[in-house]
Each structure stands twice: as structure tokens, then as C-alpha cells.
Amino acid sequence: MALGALAGAMFLWSGTFIAMKVALAVFHPVFMVFVRMAGSVLLLSPFLWRMTRSAPYSKGDWRIFALLVLSEPCLYFMFEAYALKNTTASQAGIITSLLPLLVGVGAFFILKERLPLSAWAGFFLAISGVVWLTLAGENTETAPNALLGNALEFCAMVMACSYTLCVRKLMRYPPFLISAAQAVAGMIFFGIMLVVIGLPLPDEFPPLAPLLALGFLSIATIVAYGLYNIGVARLSAGRAAAWTNLIPALTLIMGILFLGDSLTLMQSVAILPILAGVALSLLGR
């Protein structure tokens, strides 16, 4: 169940990079994420009362929940939405390969999970590859500021690392209850942001493709997080995060097929130390 859940989550998350890029062609990043969160809450609303009644709450857990929802979806989606405004879905997907290494380092310090020397070497090798990938980026129509976009995607991965470690601390809760808490917090957070920045609603009916992308994002968000939480609850934080290695390959394939993405020669070479670093880390495990 854990492995199947993680595989499904990775496929859905890879698709969200493509859907976000399509939606961002029409919608403001904050509005897009608000609709994404609100749609997830709507889908979960029939089950919220039953899930909260059965929750095994312990004193002080609200602090971990607060850090969890602040990390993801609030700050994570803020960074990622603006990242995809400035870089391609393919490049952003490649940077997600850093997540297992970030989680491994975080689990070493916080959860006291063992991290071998090879994993440390892989971490620094992959980081160097991401820096190379970012610096080798060329500004194009679909990536107007690749340097900024890739840097923001890295910040999103730091938030995803924090989220994964929090889930590991809260694994006694039902996985979809954690997903529901994220959706509600995200809807409130981005709803307040809409009011603060005074963003007007679209003045005309948007094209069909961005609307379908928003619908997919709402469904994929709640299902993917629920599946990922199942995996984290049944495996170690590092083993579950290692499955995100599927995202770069899946996103790159989807980006080429559906968005016409491409990489420069130097960026293609820069992928090698990233993949080598991830492989070195996994071999060490």
C-alpha cells in the first residue's frame, strides 16, 4: 500500500507542474493557489467532521500542525507558483530531486535517523548540480527569469522538507486529516492574501484549458498529499522522500510532450551531477 500510494502521488505531483504552468498563463499566482486550495476543501468537506472526531489529538500537537501548514501549502505554494512564473516546468521538476537529500539531512538532525557519509557526499554533489543548472539557464518566453525561478523552486523544496519531517511527527493521525488541515489553512492563507493585495477577479470568462488545469490541481492536490502521507506514515521520512526522484523524469517528459519545454546543452550536462548525487545518496542507504 505504501509503495503504490507513493507512486500515485509522484505521478499526480508531476502533472501539477504542467497544470500550474497552463493555469499561470491566465491566472495570477495567488488566485490560482487559492482556487486550488478552496477546491480541495470543497472535495473534502463531506468527510471533515468524521475525520476530526476520530483524531487522536495530543497536547502540543497544534505547534507541529502550525509549522506543517505554514511550510506546505502556504510558503511552499507561494514559492512554487512564482517559480513557475519565471522558469520552465521541466527545470522546476529537476530541482525537486533535491528533496530526498534535504529530508535526509533534516531527519539526521531532527528525527535522529542515520545518514551515511555517502549521503552527505551525494547531497553536496546534487546541490552543485542545481547551482550549475540555475546559472546555465537562458531566459526565454516560457522562462523569463530562470535564475530567480530556479532559486524560488529551491526555497519551495526547503519548505517541502520541513513538511515531510512534520508529517513524520504526526503519523498517528489519519493521512487525509493532515491533507484536510493543509487545504483549509491554505484556503485561509491565500484568501487573506487576495484581500491584502487587492487582486480583482477575472473580468471575462477564461479559456477552457486553464479552467481544466485548476480543476485538476484541486483534485490532484488532495489525493496526492493523502497518498504521500500514507507513504510517510508507513516508511521512514527518507525512504518516502526518495520517491520524489520520479518527479524530475516524469515532469521533464510531460513538459516536453505538453508544453514544448527544452534544456540548453549546459543544463543537460548539469543534470548529471544532480542525478549522480541522488544516486550516491540512495546507494548509501
Image: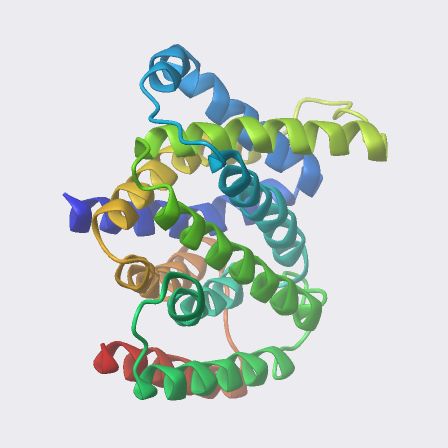
Q: Work out which quarter of the rendered image holds the N terminus and state it.
A: top left
> Of residues 35 and 88, which is closer to you in this image?
35
Count of numbered circles on the image: 0
Image location (x, y in percent) of residue 20: 54, 45
> Of residues 268 and 51, which is closer to you in this image?
51
Q: Residue furthest left?
A: 1
The answer to whether 24 is drawn above or below residue 80 in the figure is above
The answer to whether 70 is drawn above or below residue 117 in the figure is above
* Res 186 quadrant in image: top right
The colour scheme is: rainbow
Residue 162 relative to residue 57: left or right: right
Residue 33 relative to residue 65: left or right: right
* Res 174 quadrant in image: top left
> Of residues 53 and 185, which is closer to you in this image?
53
Instruction: Tell me what residue is drawn at x 31 percent, y 62 percent.
Output: 246
Q: Do we see residue 277 in this rendering?
A: yes
Image location (x, y in percent) of residue 166: 44, 48
The answer to whether 20 is drawn above or below residue 172 in the figure is below
* Res 226 quadrant in image: top left
Instruction: Tell me what residue is drawn at x 37 percent, y 61 percent.
Output: 111
Image location (x, y in percent) of residue 178: 41, 33
Instruction: Tell me what residue is drawn at x 66 percent, y 70 percent.
Output: 146
Residue 86 relative to residue 284: left or right: right
Q: Work out which quarter of the rendered image holds the C terminus and state it.
A: bottom left
Residue 14 relative to residue 34: left or right: left
Image location (x, y in percent) of residue 94: 45, 69
Q: Do we see residue 211 in this rendering?
A: no
